[in-house]
């Protein structure tokens, strides 16, 4: 959370002439009134993913690159990414941002103040709760990983 995924996603779209699909924006457009807690987010995110999977696979089948601005904080979330590119039989890159909690909290405060499209105001306590579950990707997961170390 607040590591810079959206900023990086927008840069990747520009650099690679790709389609951007942002979970935050889709959820805010489809379920704005329904999502007020982290559990709500998990519930509605799980409803969105099957539709996004099919949609992305159709793009990939046409040779169109797609950037998914979705969290991959735990192996189960990354497994969802894997299911998409494996079903489409295409190559992939998992972009992994290694950002300290202090940097993320600084960026979270900025995001809370600016409230860009699709963002929800999150407290530092919510950040701590959510990021406690974070598990970095491992080589055993079999992703082509590009690592970013913002300073």
Image (cartoon, helix red, strand yellow):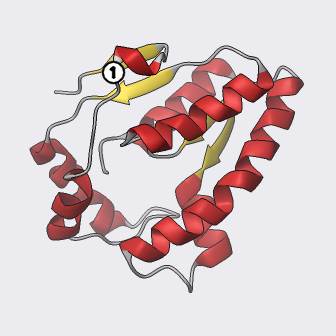
Q: Is label 1 in a helix, a strand or a loop?
A: loop
Q: In this view, does 2 lie to the left or right of 55?
A: left
Q: Quadrant of residue 97?
A: top left
Q: In this view, does 37 lie above or below 49?
A: below
Residue 128 appears at what percent x and percent y? 16, 59
Q: Residue at x 35, y 27 (%)?
A: 137
Q: In this view, does 49 lie to the left or right of 41?
A: right
Please say whether residue 35 is visible from this viewpoint: yes
Residue found at x 55% / y 84%: 34
Q: Position of residue 11 (x, y in %)?
A: 51, 29
Quarter of the image for the C terminus: give it. Answer: top left
Instruction: Give the residue at x 73% y 16%.
Output: 90
**Horizontal relation, residue 142 to residue 139: left or right:** right
Q: Which of 136 and 69 is in front in this view?
A: 136
Q: Which residue has dot 1 on it?
A: 138
The location of residue 125, given as percent across then percent down, is: 15, 68
Give whichever of 86, 48 is nearer the camera: 86
Q: Is residue 43 positioned above or below 23 on the image?
A: below
Mark 1: few/some/many CA within 10 Å (<14, 14-19, 20+): few
């Amino acid at each position: 959370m607040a590591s810079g995924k959206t900023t990086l996603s927008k840069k990747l779209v520009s650099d690679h002439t790709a389609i951007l699909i942002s979970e935050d924006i889709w959820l805010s457009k489809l379920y704005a009134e329904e999502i007020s807690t982290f559990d709500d987010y998990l519930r509605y995110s799980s409803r969105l993913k099957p539709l996004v999977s099919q949609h992305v696979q159709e793009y990939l089948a046409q040779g169109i690159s797609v950037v998914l601005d979705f969290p991959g904080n735990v192996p189960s979330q990354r497994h969802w990414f894997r299911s998409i590119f494996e079903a489409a039989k295409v190559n992939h890159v998992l972009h992994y941002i290694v950002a300290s909690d202090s940097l993320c909290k600084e960026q979270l405060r900025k995001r809370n103040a600016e409230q860009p499209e699709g963002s929800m105001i999150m407290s530092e306590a919510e950040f701590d709760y959510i990021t406690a579950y974070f598990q970095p990707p491992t080589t055993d997961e079999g992703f082509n990983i590009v690592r970013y170390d913002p300073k």
